[in-house]
């Protein structure tokens, strides 16, 4: 193993080391140790070697240092501030511990809360060949800003079942968020593994782009739009435009089917073209089933789009 200390994230390791030593629960300490081992491994070090660098590495001012004296300053401006702040912290901690007790009854143990799911296990193995130590922020080759590469999509689809409708993607997204919230109850500083984040990013892409022209699909998409509105930060404008386009397309198709009582030939053709562009690896038979057309029709469209370089969804 080649040691490259320059790849060791000292700041993150220092924070993780504190959780290893002072974590509120055994699960929190174990999760911190696992993360420290990964940080060390990325730099070609053992955990002991990595931790030894903390004794010599210069440490800049911490958040605690930067706010030293703040409570005293606030107390001078607002008498009783310290007591109120302490009461708020105590109440927050009381609620957290009560939530942990609920989760222990639900899961059976703290270890079960942090146990990798079947999806997490499968994605970790499938994405390993695409790992990129140089990509410290995202972890995989060509991966950035939450956008999966074609190779990553292939790995994900080969490892787990990917939702085929907006409502399926929404249910999977909610399950992912719930699990992370449960883990954060025990370990407030918990962050998902890189392969788990990939699943999250895959689901958000599907929620933005999947076409499901049904009442259930539109309802799920609206729920997703509410989630996006409450994220607390702005997304890339391109993603929001894609989301609006998908909703508009599904709503138009749904209204047309309601008015006519059946899907028109043009609607079915549009569905075929959309599936061929968004999920080209699907078989003609599977696309035909979803779009309610014949496999021959799908094959004809596949050849036409291939001749156009797959750059157009127009007739």
Image: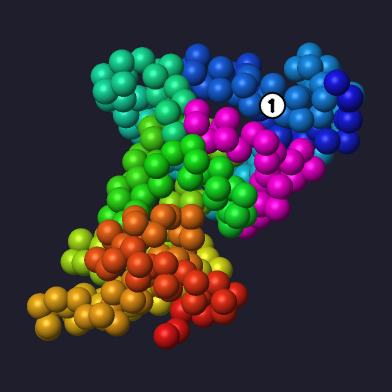
Residue at (40, 77) in percent of width and height: 245
Residue that label 1 marks: 38
Residue nearest the observer in this picture, 147 or 154:
154
Residue 278 point in image, percent of width and height:
46, 64
Say whether residue 289 is left or right of residue 68. Answer: left
Quadrant assignment, res 55: top right
Task: Report the magenta stretch's main SS.
Answer: loop
Q: Quadrant of the C terminus?
A: bottom left
Q: Residue at x 62, y 21 (%)?
A: 34
Q: Quick check: is 33 in the magenta stretch? A: no
Using the image, determine if residue 77 lies above or below residue 10.
Answer: below
Give 262 or 121, whichever is nearer the viewer.
Answer: 262
Q: Residue at x 34, y 57 (%)?
A: 285
Is residue 19 or residue 85 the one in the foreground? 19
Give the residue at x 40% y 24%: 113
Residue 73 location (% of width, % of height): 61, 47
Magenta residues, start to end: 121-145
Residue 131 painted magenta:
yes
Q: Quadrant of the N terminus?
A: top right
Secondary element under disc 1, as helix, strand or loop, is helix
Q: Residue furthest front?
A: 296
Residue 216: x and y in percent read: 20, 61
Q: State the image coordinates of residue 19 (x, y, percent, origin top left).
A: 61, 24
Position of 189 relative to 243 (above/below): above
């Amino acid at each position: 193993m080649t040691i490259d200390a320059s790849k060791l994230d000292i700041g993150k390791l220092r924070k993780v080391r504190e959780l290893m030593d002072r974590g509120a629960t055994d699960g929190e300490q174990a999760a911190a140790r696992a993360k420290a081992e990964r940080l060390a491994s990325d730099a070609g070090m053992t955990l002991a070697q990595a931790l030894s660098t903390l004794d010599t590495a210069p440490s800049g001012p911490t958040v605690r240092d930067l706010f030293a004296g703040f409570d005293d300053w606030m107390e001078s401006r607002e008498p009783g501030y310290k007591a109120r702040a302490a009461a708020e912290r105590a109440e927050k901690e009381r609620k957290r511990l009560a939530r942990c007790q609920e989760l222990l009854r639900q899961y059976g143990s703290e270890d079960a809360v942090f146990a990798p799911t079947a999806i997490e296990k499968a994605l970790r193995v499938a994405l390993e060949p695409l790992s990129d130590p140089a990509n410290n922020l995202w972890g995989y080759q060509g991966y950035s800003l939450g956008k999966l590469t074609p190779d990553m999509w292939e790995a994900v689809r080969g490892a787990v079942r990917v939702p085929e409708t907006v409502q399926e993607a929404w249910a999977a997204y909610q399950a992912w968020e719930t699990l992370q919230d449960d883990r954060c109850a025990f370990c407030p500083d918990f962050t998902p593994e890189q392969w788990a984040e990939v699943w999250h990013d895959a689901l958000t892409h599907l929620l933005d782009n999947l076409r499901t022209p049904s009442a259930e699909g539109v309802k799920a998409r609206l729920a997703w739009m509410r989630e996006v509105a409450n994220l607390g930060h702005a997304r890339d404008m391109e993603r929001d435009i894609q989301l609006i386009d998908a909703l508009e397309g599904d709503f138009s198709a749904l209204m047309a089917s309601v008015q006519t009582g059946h899907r028109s030939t043009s609607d079915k053709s549009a569905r075929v073209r959309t599936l061929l562009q968004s999920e080209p690896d699907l078989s003609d038979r599977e696309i035909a089933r979803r779009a309610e057309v014949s496999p021959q029709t799908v094959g004809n469209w596949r050849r036409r789009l291939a001749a156009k370089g797959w750059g157009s969804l127009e007739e």
